[in-house]
Amino acid sequence: MSSKAPKRIFLTEDEMPKQWYNVRADMKNKPAAMLNPGTLKPITAEELEHVFCSELVKQELDDTTQYFDIPEEVQNFYKIFRPSPLIRAYELEKALDTPAKIYYKFEGNNTSGSHKLNSAGAQVYYAKKQGLTSLTTETGAGQWGTALAMACEHYGMDLTVYMVKCSFEQKAYRKAIIETFGANIIASPSNTTNVGRQILAKFPNTTGSLGCAISEAVEKAVSTDNCRYVLGSVLNQVLLHQTIIGEESKIQLEKVGDYPDVVIGCAGGGSNLGGIISPFMRDRLTGEKNPRFIAVEPISCPSLSRGKFAYDFCDTGHVTPLAKMYTLGAEFMPSPSHAGGLRYHGMSPILSQLYHDGYIDEARAVLQTKVFEAANFFAKTETILPAPESSHAISVAIDEALRCKEEGKSETILFNLTGTGYFDMTAYMSYRDNTMSDIIPTDDDLQAGFASLPII
């Protein structure tokens, strides 16, 4: 190993970014405005403030401010678990016999095991500052629910989490840790809300989806005094907070004189992918550099690669504003894949627009068994057991490294490793004993979801 290229590239607290980057400011084609589902007119700040806290609404609607200062209180919260290391995957490179240089940004150095704490800390801070006393949210695999429970405990706020039913049943330890931090957790869809009862009546055997859980969390928020809803992905405000990942990565790569040719992230709602690519996307949008961007999604829920770019509800119960995004339809029910954090029918409007305009070069849908093959290989070489969600990025990073080997190219590959897999041992055991299956939705399956798209 060369002394000029350390295995782990760290930042000091003083080197941490002090601002979040708003990629919309540099986009020629801005994401389309969210619409009020009743009037089909652009949603107003006043309307959104019934659901979200005021400062987050400002961030959500701002398409022109390039940088937002990170409040000092949030910076101090970040210093509990940040900056996170950028790691050169020397052992993985060696095992693949590739000339490529592979780096991964490791966001698993906190109890949630993921990047979700970056936005959770910011959102709870703004809610507390506004004087709110409780919050509601949804969670898929549980990383977001865990992160938000941690942030609410830190700031002294009550939290109710609606967890997608299949993940609730698969990941008992996730439930336990969310409860450890004082949150109330409910399997979704449930009988505790009107919309939950309606979904169960229509789909009595459903294993749930993020769209269902969002519907319930929003209903709970708007019917509870001094309460608001917070979301862990998809929204502009969430991608804004997650850009600290890419901003740190960029500084770290500069320390070793490197820059990525390819940037890879898993894609469910968009927080992982958006967080890592945004600062590098800025270089592409401004013409300074031309890196390639790859979004990786589960083949069982292929919103970018097989979805439609259209206005749709962000939730299954049709209580949220309409967003223009790549979607499989709000009523699409994905199979109960182990990558629960990627089982969402739509995609961030920001990332959808960038993909539609060709700035995100490729959306790759991968088989669940292939993802776990890559996860096991990565664990054996780099000694980190990765979460199923970010293992999607690992799978494609390996493919790209092997492409470099075939083509004799020494490219630099960067991917986002945003979670650990220690709460996902059921999935790892399923892969090891060959009981894991790959479910690919048929065209008829997708058409059923598309049939639920509103006519705009």
Image (cartoon, grey):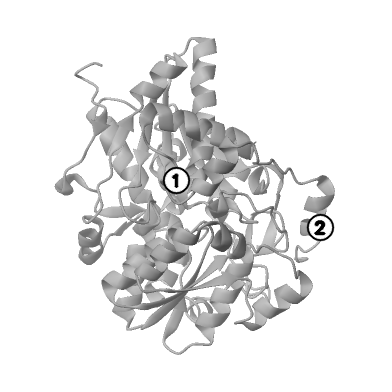
Residue under pointer 2: 448
Residue 10: x percent and y percent? 22, 38
- For residue 97, which quarter of the picture? top left
Above or below 3: residue 424: below
**Residue neighbourhood size for the residue with mark 2, other residues' Cα within 10 Å, grouped as few (<14), some (14–19), many (≥20):** some
Q: Which mark is first along the chain, 2 or 1?
A: 1
Q: How many marks?
A: 2
The residue tagged with tag 2: helix, strand or loop?
helix
| Residue at x 26% of width, y 35% of height | 252
Q: Amino acid at mark 2?
A: Ala
- 216 sits left or right of 250 in the view: right
Is mark 1 in CB contact (under 8 Å) with mark 2? no
Residue 29: x percent and y percent? 56, 50
| Residue at x 40% of width, y 37% of height | 283
Above or below 304: residue 262: above
Instruction: Please identify the residue farthest to the front as the structure is shown.
Output: 433
Q: Nearer the viewer, residue 349 or 369?
A: 369
- 169 sits left or right of 65 in the view: right
Label of residue 299 in the image: none
- For residue 62, which quarter of the picture? bottom left
Q: Nearer the viewer, residue 428 or 377?
A: 428
Q: Amino acid at mark 1?
A: Gly
Answer yes or no: is residue 42 visible: no
**CA distance for labels 1 and 2:** 33 Å
Residue 243: x percent and y percent? 37, 50
**Residue neighbourhood size for the residue with mark 1, other residues' Cα within 10 Å, grouped as few (<14), some (14–19), many (≥20):** many
Q: Nearer the viewer, residue 436 or 64?
A: 436
- 42 sits left or right of 198 in the view: left
Above or below 410: residue 297: below
Residue under pointer 1: 421
